[in-house]
Amino acid sequence: MRRPFIAGNWKMHMTTSEASGLASELVAACREIDGVDIAVAPPFTALAAVGKAFAGSSIGLGAQNMHWEDKGAFTGEIAAAMLTDVGCRYVILGHSERRQFFGETDEGVNRKVLAAFKHKLIPIVCVGESEEERDRGVTFVIVDRQVTGALKNVAASQMANVVVAYEPIWAIGTGRTATPAQAQEVHQTIRAKLAGLFGNEAAAGVRILYGGSVMPENAAEFVSLEGVDGALVGGASLKVDAFTGIVTETARVKATAR
Ligand code: PEP
């Protein structure tokens, strides 16, 4: 049984004091919610403050990126051990904004995934096609390539600690979402690919999230789909009511499905 999972990505928002305030509000708002794993990925500068606010709560701390090397002359980069040192449990890897604006490749994502395992971080591996790729009919080719590339040299036994986020790029921050049918067919394709690479049992244990303009109003549409285990949330994770609404909807839908 896969535990539902909602992760928030704060991107390049929130000073330390803003982050701390929002994190404390989230802890209070999510206290009573059961049956859903929750994580938030603030910017690096706010990790320590948010970690402090989350202490003793069930909300997990995540980072938005990291480097694959343990340490060294990599100006501006952050290593996995630095993330675990401030209490991170998760790291988002291969987000489309990193691929689009910072030249991240499947090979680089793969190195980071392997480094995450070495440091006992749970990678949230993002995959998804652009609008142009969807229009050209190559969505499955792209997602297949991204999944295969990111998970090269990963052992089947490690797959229980991988989260995959399917995020169509055209749905990120645009207010447009995939239709439930579009989301479901890509989720099914990803799980089938994982089964081909790692076996049915390992694939069945991997949580696959949907991401792209998820709001409290549409969350149920996605998380009620077979094989959709939760959501990666950008914009709505910056508002306590919206993020809590998504978590609450997920808890409700998944409890009904059990
Ligand atoms: C994201 O950046 O991962 C994301 C899904 O953003 P939004 O929810 O704002 O579309």
Image (cartoon, rainbow, N blue to C red):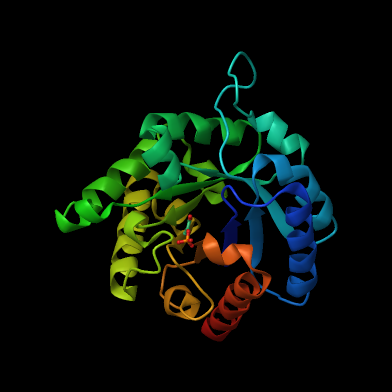
Which image quarter holds the C terminus? Answer: bottom right
Instruction: Tell which residue pokes out farthest to the top in this image.
Output: 73
230 and 167: which one is in front?
A: 167
Which residue is at a point 82% across and 56% down the rendered structure image?
Answer: 53
Residue 134 position by quadrant:
bottom left
Q: Where 1 falls versus 76 (above or below)?
A: below
220 and 135: which one is in front?
A: 135
Instruction: Tell which residue pokes out farthest to the left in this image.
Output: 136
Q: Where 86 falls versus 222 (above or below)?
A: above
Measuring from the top left, give residue 214's x and y in whole percent: 47, 69
Residue 151 seen in this snapshot: no
- Name the side, left or right, on which 80 lies relative to 211: right
Which image quarter holds the N terminus? Answer: bottom right
Which residue is at a point 45% across and 61% down the rendered structure image?
Answer: 211
Which residue is at a point 34% across and 52% down the rendered structure image?
Answer: 128
Measuring from the top left, give residue 226's x and y in whole percent: 41, 73
Which residue is at a point 64% across and 32% down the rendered structure image?
Answer: 80
Residue 151 position by quadrant:
top left
Q: Where 230 falls versus 203 (above or below)?
A: below
Measuring from the top left, give residue 66's x and y in whole percent: 58, 34
- Name the side, left or right, on which 185 lies relative to 94: left
Measuring from the top left, give residue 115's x and y in whole percent: 57, 30
Residue 26 seen in this snapshot: yes
